[in-house]
Amino acid sequence: MENKDWRFGVVANITEYHIGEDGNVYRGTKPFTPGTKVYLGGKAWDGESDSIGVIGRNRFGRIVVEWIPVNCLENIRAQRIFKPSILKIISYEEIAEGWEWWGRTSSDRRATKEFAEDLKNVLSVT
């Protein structure tokens, strides 16, 4: 049976190592281990900020919403989101926090691909 509840989104993985503001090298981020898949709240990012809102499974196995530095992201890509637990949080964030997420239309698909490419370009410059 096919799952009919889905939407387009942008996902990424947490980098293995990153340099913090203090100049020290850190493994992963405070809430996420390296390689963790996170769902990016792209419409909540203005393109200039150094952090972005994400949804992901933290170090303790709980799904959380966090703001992390964009330079801690790698393997950024557009994808369909099917996980019911993630879709539930996305719906909550849209209603309670005013985050805008993508839907299921072809224009949303194009928008997610463009956003992923734009974010990759921003990260390649830094």
Image: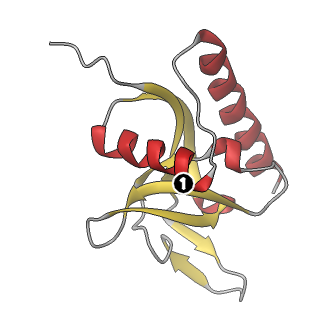
Image height check: is 114 above or below 100? Answer: above
What secondary structure is found at the residue carrying circle 1? helix
Would residue 71 be seen by someone viewing this image from the given angle? yes
Tell me: 14 left or right of 22.
left
Would residue 35 be seen by someone viewing this image from the given angle? no
Q: Which residue is depicted at the point 60% across and 65% down?
A: 67
Kind of residue at badge 1: Ala
Q: Position of residue 69 (x, y in %)?
A: 66, 65
Q: Give the quadrant of residue 117.
A: top right
Classify 10 Å Cα crowding around label 1: few (below 14), some (14-19), many (20 and above).
few
Q: Give the quadrant of residue 106.
A: top right
Q: Which residue is depicted at the point 63% across and 28% down?
A: 112
Q: Position of residue 47 (x, y in %)?
A: 81, 48
The quarter of the picture where the C terminus appears is: bottom right
**46 and 113: which one is in front?**
46
The quarter of the picture where the N terminus appears is: top left
Image height check: is 45 above or below 33? Answer: above
